[in-house]
Amino acid sequence: MSCRYIDMEVPSNNRSLILLSQRETLWLIAGSLAFSLIVFYPVLCDPGLSGWRAALPDFRHFTLIPDYGDPDLFTALRWVPYYTLTHFHQLSFWNPYKCGGMAMLGNPESAIVTPFLFSYLTLGLMPGMLLDICLHIAIGFAGGYLLGRELGLRPLACVVLAGMFPSSSWLPFHVGYGQLNFVPALYIPLILALLLAACRIRRWYPAALGGLIYALTLTEGNYTFVYAAFVVALVGITLSLVRLSFRPLAAAMLVGVFALAFGALKGIPVSDVLALHPRVYGASWITWPGVFQALFSHDQNAYRPSSQPFSFGEFGGYVGIPFVVLALLGIIAGGRDVLPWIVGMIAFLLLFRGDTGPHALITYVHFLPLGKNLGFSGRWIVPLVFCVGVLAATGAQFLCDRFRVWGVRLVAVLLAVG
């Protein structure tokens, strides 16, 4: 299949929601779980940046509760609902254990309205939290593969898309910091896959399902809801212009409407809390040398010296050189179909740069409702890496189509090294 999107104007003969055979679906489930275990494994180890490769897992992590910084903060935000449900048998809309009492459902970083709450109730707080992280990684991989299929990519190119985004250093940085509100960003590929599926089969229910999953980026976190909004809007608008069709834009709008509806249970109290107590961090930025370090430096150490006003871990999102090569090929060979991802890459790079001047792109984002609550500019690295991943998958598709045998082998090598 050529490196292109499935034509959204021609009705497809395949009306199924998922473009996978039963065998490919089973392989995807197994591969997603295996990938998540590999990426998740260092969470169970203590010896530092490289020592975990030769270390055995420390199973005390299944019982020890962190007592410092953000890990303590985000664990507490999960402990309160867990304790309230298990001991008082009621939902935790209020947190009586902090500062004399604070809103729990209205806390932007809480994670109450989520199906993963059952893992906490079933396994206990810390085992449930670790399973929560591991399953999100699997969902991120599977969603990336499904998105690749919707884009008309070969399985190997789909693996490039599926593997690059959740294996970039932005995820272990935030998990290492304890910032579990960034884990829902792994839903973004699946949301877009459902958006494109709605266009392909010319039905609206996949967009509604995408809105439900999109709502989880709000009910399980905060910032990732905004990142997903920008990606969905860019894809919907750009594809509508490229294809001269209103359907992609309508599907994107439907995803957003259902996300707001499903997420209103948390979204309404959160907006009230932020209106009363805004979380404005002030200016943040990154220099061009800092951009190259964040994306391409092998020294992805959260506490390395940084020229930015915050720690390196708030800006890091490693993209290996093999993926850069594939992304450049995707830009050159992808044609108009890669325009959404090129536009997204440029836009998110400018947002990632932050407050670099009076007319920096981030200053206009601050005019949006609650826009000044978006935190450090470095966190825009998350959607930036995602767009680069789609371009890299497109480049992998080009090599596989152009050079057949040797192209497939070369892509396999680049994927493994990357």
Image (cartoon, grey):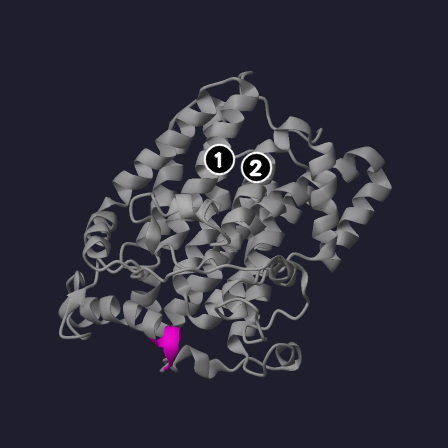
Residue 312, quarter of picture: bottom right
Taking the spot 35% from the left edge, 36% from the top edge, the residue there is: 256
- The residue labelled by disc 2 is 343
Residue drawn at 27 percent across, 42 percent down: 262
Instruction: Specify the amino acid type for callout 2.
Output: Val
In the image, residue 272 lies in the stretch drawn in magenta: no
Q: Residues within 10 Å of mark 2 (few under 14, many from 20)?
A: some
Position of residue 252 measured from the top left corner of the image (x, y, whole percent)? 42, 31
Q: Quadrant of the N terminus?
A: top right
Check the picture and name the quadrant holding the C terminus.
bottom right
- At label 1, which amino acid type do we have? Leu
Q: In the rendered structure, which segment of residues is drawn in magenta?
A: 68-72
Q: On the image, numbered disc 1 is attached to which residue? A: 234
Q: Is residue 349 above or below residue 253?
A: below
- Mark 2 → mark 1, Cα distance in angstroms: 8 Å
**Viewer-proximal residue among 263 and 239:** 239
Q: Quadrant of residue 125?
A: bottom left
